[in-house]
Image: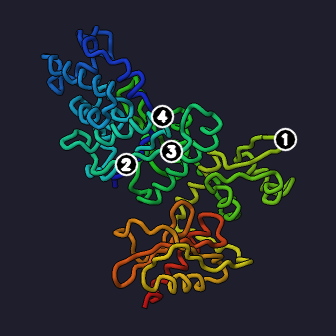
Amino acid sequence: MKPTTLLCTVGTSLFTPNLRGLDPEVLYARDPHPSDAAGLDAKAALDRYGLWKDRGPLRGILSGLRQSFDHKNWRTLGGQLSALPPELRLCGAEINSTAAMVRKGFLSDNRERLVLLVSHTEEGQAIGTILTKYFTERGGEIRFNRCEPLPVEGLQDERPLVFQKEGLTNLVRLLGEQLRKWGAQNIAINATGGYKAQIALAVAFGQAARCPVFYKHERFDQIIRFPRVPFTMDLSMVEEHLKLWADLAEPRAVFGEREIDRYLPEDGPLREAILPLLDCIEEDGETYYSMSALGMVYWEAYRTANPDLKLEPEKVGQRLGCRFPQHHYPEGFRDYVERVYNALPAHIIECHAVDYSGQKGIRNRFYIEGGRITGEYVDREKFGGRFAVQTSAINELERNWVLHQLNNWLSSGALR
């Protein structure tokens, strides 16, 4: 079965040098020299769209692109790009490579969704807007049913340390989340666009997760699929020390030397195996550790192979009760929150009411958002409220365990 979902790393070649250096009166103004392979390819592509023999319409398209770029009309620019053949280098690495994947039959004819992993920058956001419009344009040659740009927090080139310690690990984290969300068997990765380290990690993750990864060099018309390596990562150390890995993999988790010594005893084999997979930094004479991007590849590869993992958290010490800081609540809300609080006394520390705007989206349920478990309740008049459930869970797998228990409690008739 061919992939229906494509995850695509995104760079900035569409802006620099392509659109930033665009001169509509000069580009494609002359016939290419017989030895100019790239020029001949561009001529053939434009001829396919009927834009070479009479170049008046072509100049109009290029002038429109230049104007939209100068005025930052990103959605308009995305629509204008669809008037050009997608293999034209001017369209940028992401469009060129995705078009090559479609042309080679690497994707399903039912291209359900495209997920764009864009940098955490103003340019990244702009290019995400352009490509979203381009890939969902009606009548477009390589259209997807849906397209979603996902900013990778920390993925920028102004602060190298943030790029290394946050951007790259968050990239791998997002890749893993997407594979679990849509099913690894339905997904391919296009690792053509973006920073070199970004491309390398996307390739490493795809290999570890047994997901097909494709790459197209800008100078060649061919796109390649990376062959599967004849060996696999030894993920047994993840399986055997699941809580340790889950704690280390938490977003923005940073550990001092004493914490690491507690997790990884000196001279032990586990320390020797895991320490090289951590980033370390010295600050004010202290050494701090966090999960590296390569360590995150191990974690996300294991999570992808075992998507339903859960861990029971430690039991709570002191319990803090329930808090209701607002004045107006749905009928039965306070009683319901109290019952939730008492449903898992060994693991729930506190419940407290939170903002309940967006009434249309509220229904009787529990979910995890931003590392927090939230409960929702709707009364007989369809008026809803939300509340936070503070638990002893400190990592994703433990939050999943608590969420599973709460959903079982809800489905067993808690609202009757």
**Above or below — where is 99 with respect to 396?**
above
Measured Cα–Cα span from mark 1 to mark 2? 43 Å
Measured Cα–Cα span from mark 1 to mark 3? 31 Å
**Please, what is the three-letter code of the amino acid marked with disc 1?**
Gly
Measured Cα–Cα span from mark 3 to mark 2? 13 Å
Asked if residue 136 can be seen in this view, the reply is: yes
Q: Quadrant of residue 149?
A: top left
Number of other residues with Cα within 10 Å of mark 4, as a class: few under 14, some 14 to 19, many 20 or more: many
Q: Residue at x 13, y 16 (%)?
A: 54
Dot label at residue 152 = 3
**Please, what is the three-letter code of the amino acid marked with disc 3?**
Val
Measured Cα–Cα span from mark 4 to mark 3? 12 Å
Mark 4 or mark 3, whichever is nearer to me: 3
Q: Which of the two discs, 4 and 1, labels the residue nearer the N terminus?
A: 4
Depth check, front residue: 138 or 371 = 371
Provide the residue designation for mark 1. 285
Dot label at residue 148 = 2
Provide the residue designation for mark 4. 194
Mark 4 or mark 1, whichever is nearer to me: 1
Measured Cα–Cα span from mark 2 to mark 4? 17 Å
Local SS, label 1? loop
**Above or below — where is 272 with respect to 182?**
above
Number of other residues with Cα within 10 Å of mark 3, as a class: few under 14, some 14 to 19, many 20 or more: many
